[in-house]
C-alpha cells in the first residue's frame, strides 16, 4: 500500500488564541485581574498512512482572523471574570479545621488569611464595584430579563458558523454557558446604565461586516468514510460485498491501515477543493448522502470505496443577515470600553470603606531646625 507522506489533523483546527482586550463589568478597575488559563491548543498533527488528505486541515474546524473581536465582547469579558469571592468567616468558627496534615489542622482562619494575602484586595475591589453597579441599577429601576440574556447569547452564537464552534471556543477558554449567562446579565446592566452614551452607527456595522464576512462564510462540505485497498480487484470485491449487504464500517475496520481504521473509515467533513486528493474529492462530491461509490476511486494512495454520510450547504450570509447581531456585539464592546470611566465616576460619588486597602505612608515632616532662620544672619 502506498504511504501518505502528508500530515493532517482529523480533529480539525483549533480556534485561534483570542486577544483579551476587554474588561469585565465587575472588575474593570486595576485590570491586572484574573485571566482564565487558556486550554492549550494542541498544535501537533497526526501522520495518517494511506489517507487521502492533503496538507490543509479539514474545514470542520475553523480558525479565522476575525474571531477575536467576535468573542471579545462577551466571551472574553466572561473569561476575565474569574473572581475569587472570599467572604470572612464568623469569628466563632475561624478555628474550625478545613483540612489536616498528619493530625495538624489547617483552620478556616488560615485559609481565609491565605486567600486575602493571595488576592484579597483585588477581590474586595471587585465586590465593591459589583455592589456599586447593583445599587445604581436599583436606583434607576433598571431590569434585565432572562429573555434579554438569551437574546444576547443568541446574538453572540450567530457570530460563529455553528453551535459546535461556539461551544469549542467556550471550552477552550474554560467557560460554561452558565458563566456566560451571568456575565451577559452584568453586561446588559452596564449597557442600560450607559444608555445614550453607546452609539453604534450604520457605517461602523458595515465596516465590521466587511472585515469579518469571510468568517461567516463556509463552502459546501461532505462527510465521508472510505475503505482503502491496494488494488482495483480488491476494491471491486469490496463493492460486491457491500452490494450483498455487508457493513461498510466493518470492512473499513478490517481493510484500512490509516487512522480511520477504528472509526469505520470516517474522514469527517471536508470541502471540495484543497483538502483531499482531487480524484477522491471529485468522486465524493458526486455522491448523494447515504450512497457509496459503485466503482473503485483511484488516488495517489490506492483504491477507495467512498461512502457519503452527510452534506452541508454553502453559507454566504449578507450584511442584512448579520447587521443586528453585529450591532449588538459592537454595543457590548463600546460598553466595555466606557465602563471603567463610568464606574470611577460612581465610586467618586459613593462612600466606600475598604479595610484591606493599604494606607498611604505619611509624608516625612521637615526638621524643625530647618525651619529656623540661621543665627549667623543676625
Image (spheres, rainbow, N blue to C red):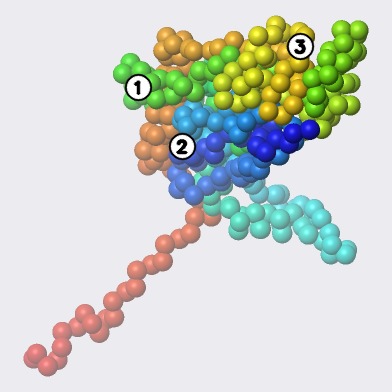
Please report the residue visible at 60 percent of the width from the left and 34 percent of the height from the top: 55
Residue 67 falls left or right of residue 268? left
Please rate how many residues cluster around mark 2, counting C-alpha atoms within 10 Å: few if below 14, some from 14 to 19, many from 20.
many
Q: Is residue 95 visible?
A: no
**Marks 3 and 2: which is nearer the front?**
3
Q: 75 and 338: which one is in front?
A: 75
Please report the residue visible at 65 percent of the width from the left and 37 percent of the height from the top: 6
Q: 74 and 166: which one is in front?
A: 166
Real-space Cα distance between discs 2 and 1? 20 Å
Residue at disc 3, secondary structure: loop
Residue at disc 2, secondary structure: loop
x and y percentages locating residue 68 in the rendered image: 49, 33
View extreme (bottom): residue = 376
Name the image quarter holding the N terminus. top right
**Marks 1 and 3: which is nearer the front?**
3
Residue 265 falls left or right of residue 76? right
Q: 363 and 196: which one is in front?
A: 196
Please report the residue visible at 44 percent of the width from the left and 24 percent of the height from the top: 212
Which residue, given by chain and number where applicable, does mark 3 sit on?
295
Which residue, given by chain and number where applicable, does mark 2 sit on?
22
Real-space Cα distance between discs 1 and 3? 50 Å
> Which is nearer the N-term, disc 2 or disc 1?
2
Which residue, given by chain and number where applicable, does mark 1 sit on?
207
x and y percentages locating residue 175 in the rendered image: 64, 34
Amino acid at each position: 500500500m502506498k504511504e501518505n507522506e502528508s500530515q493532517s489533523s482529523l480533529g480539525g483546527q483549533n480556534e485561534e488564541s483570542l486577544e483579551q482586550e476587554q474588561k469585565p463589568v465587575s472588575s474593570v478597575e486595576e485590570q491586572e485581574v484574573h485571566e482564565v488559563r487558556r486550554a492549550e491548543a494542541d498544535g501537533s498533527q497526526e501522520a495518517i498512512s494511506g489517507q487521502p488528505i492533503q496538507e490543509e486541515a479539514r474545514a470542520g474546524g475553523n480558525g479565522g482572523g476575525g474571531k477575536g473581536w467576535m468573542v471579545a465582547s462577551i466571551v472574553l469579558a466572561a473569561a476575565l471574570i474569574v473572581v475569587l469571592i472570599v467572604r470572612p468567616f464568623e469569628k466563632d468558627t475561624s478555628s474550625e479545621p478545613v483540612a489536616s496534615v498528619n493530625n495538624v489542622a489547617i483552620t478556616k482562619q488560615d485559609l481565609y488569611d491565605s486567600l486575602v494575602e493571595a488576592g484579597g484586595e483585588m477581590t474586595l475591589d471587585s465586590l465593591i464595584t459589583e455592589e456599586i453597579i447593583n445599587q445604581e441599577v436599583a436606583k434607576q429601576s433598571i431590569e434585565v430579563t432572562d429573555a434579554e440574556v438569551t437574546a444576547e447569547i443568541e446574538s453572540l452564537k450567530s457570530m460563529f458558523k455553528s453551535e459546535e464552534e461556539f461551544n469549542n471556543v467556550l471550552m477552550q477558554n474554560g467557560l460554561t454557558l452558565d458563566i456566560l449567562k451571568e456575565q451577559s446579565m452584568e453586561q446588559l446592566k452596564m449597557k442600560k446604565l450607559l444608555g445614550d452614551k453607546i452609539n453604534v452607527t450604520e457605517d461602523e456595522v458595515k465596516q465590521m461586516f466587511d472585515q469579518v464576512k469571510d468568517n461567516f462564510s463556509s463552502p459546501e462540505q461532505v462527510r465521508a468514510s472510505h475503505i482503502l485497498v491496494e488494488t482495483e480487484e480488491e476494491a471491486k470485491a469490496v463493492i460486491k460485498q457491500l452490494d450483498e449487504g455487508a457493513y461498510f464500517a466493518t470492512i473499513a475496520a478490517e481493510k484500512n491501515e490509516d487512522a480511520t481504521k477504528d472509526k469505520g473509515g470516517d474522514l469527517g467533513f471536508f470541502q471540495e477543493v484543497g483538502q483531499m486528493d482531487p480524484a477522491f474529492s471529485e468522486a465524493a462530491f458526486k455522491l448523494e448522502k447515504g450512497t457509496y461509490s459503485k466503482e473503485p476511486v483511484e488516488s495517489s494512495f490506492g483504491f477507495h470505496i467512498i461512502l457519503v454520510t452527510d452534506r452541508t450547504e454553502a453559507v454566504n450570509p449578507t450584511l442584512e443577515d448579520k447587521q443586528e447581531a453585529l450591532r449588538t456585539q459592537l454595543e457590548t464592546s463600546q460598553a466595555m470600553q466606557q465602563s471603567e470611566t463610568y464606574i470611577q465616576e460612581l465610586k467618586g460619588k459613593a462612600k466606600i470603606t475598604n479595610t484591606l486597602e493599604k494606607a498611604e505612608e505619611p509624608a516625612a515632616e521637615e526638621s524643625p531646625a530647618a525651619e529656623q532662620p540661621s543665627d549667623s544672619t543676625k
